[in-house]
Image: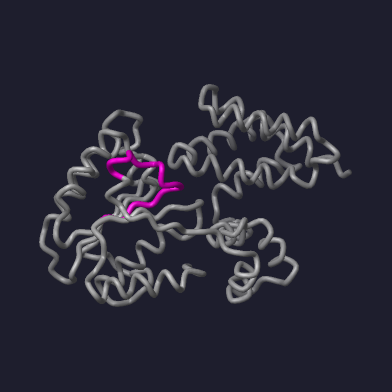
Amino acid sequence: MLYGYDNLVGDFKKLVDAQELSHAYLFFGEPQTGKFLFAKYLANYIETGKFEESTSPLSETFIVDFGSEKDEASRDGKESVGIDKVREIERFLYQTPMSSRYRVAIIRDAEWLTDTAQNALLKILEEPPKSGVIIATARDSSVFLPTVASRMQGIYFKTLPTDKILDFLAKYGKIGKLESEKIGRESFGRIGRAVAIIESQGSQNKLFNIVKKSLSKSYSGKAELEGAVDELLKLIDKSPLNLERFFEEILNKIRPKFLNHPRECREIMQEIAWMESLTVSKRIHLKNILWKTRYILSDSS
């Protein structure tokens, strides 16, 4: 559900209606701020005139979603990651649109694109197809090489103030005031995170539930912990942002315990720093983080 970007919606509608869209955009900002969803809404507006998520495939839109299982083969760690997808984008965009003014290519999680893939993308940007629009989404604008970034218009998706999150939760329905306030605090200004927290209560959000289950008192066996780590590693391999979201969940859990357990909390933060360096075994540090976090949370003080 897209929420909180009314001005941006209005601006893009005007650009589409006046046929003044740029050839390439980079939607950047923190995870779960609605960048990818906005891109899909925009593509649907271009083709159908409705600024909402399409309920059926769009004939003039090509989506490269590096965060999905279907594109797992494109993220095998080889130098050519993304290059084949960029070539598909090129073939798609240079075809004449049949049902709208533009053909749109959306690249989700552009962090996955290697320099080789970006150089292939640069060739498209240097001679952009007349009716083609590329929209990439990423955490920050530094994801692209300077030569590529200079040819894309950056659009920043900021986090929302808590009152906006609470207003969204009130409209979401079926959530009590106290629970809404808690979710508002833990959402960090991101609608997507607020929704993920709500869905995790219904066992629909995988990452939230793996963390929650692995930290519960009834989930203490070594084999169970190994299983949780296996699941976490699979999610992290699918998208680098899942590792960041895992860190957020852990830090959010230990924050209230920092005064009583400063040493242990600092040790967890150090484990996270080591994981971010990517110079150590993810499995070892995931297990250490989960064990230490569970120890802190088991203390009722």
Residue 219: % across, % down: 70, 40
- Comparing 159 with 50, the one in front is 159
Q: Tell me if residue 192 is in the magenta stretch.
A: no
Residue 91: % across, % down: 14, 50
Residue 206: % across, % down: 54, 49
Side (left or right) of 252 relative to 145: right
Magenta segment boundaries in residue numbering: 134-148
Side (left or right) of 166 relative to 25: right
Side (left or right) of 26 relative to 247: left
- Comparing 140 with 214, the one in front is 140
Indicate the quadrant where residue 203 lies.
Answer: bottom right
Residue at figure coordinates x 67%, y 29% from the top left:
270
Residue 205: % across, % down: 55, 54
Q: Residue furthest top?
A: 280
Quadrant (top left, top right, bottom left, bottom right) of the C terminus:
top right
Residue at figure coordinates x 40%, y 71% from the top left:
9
In the image, residue 261 sits, relative to residue 21, either above or below, namely above
Q: Tell me if residue 145 is in the magenta stretch.
A: yes
Q: Residue furthest left?
A: 96
Indicate the quadrant where residue 54 lies.
Answer: bottom left
Counting every numbered tag in the picture gives 0
Q: Residue furthest right?
A: 301
Side (left or right) of 123 relative to 253: left
In the image, residue 160 sits, relative to residue 243, either above or below, namely below
- Comparing 4 with 15, the one in front is 15
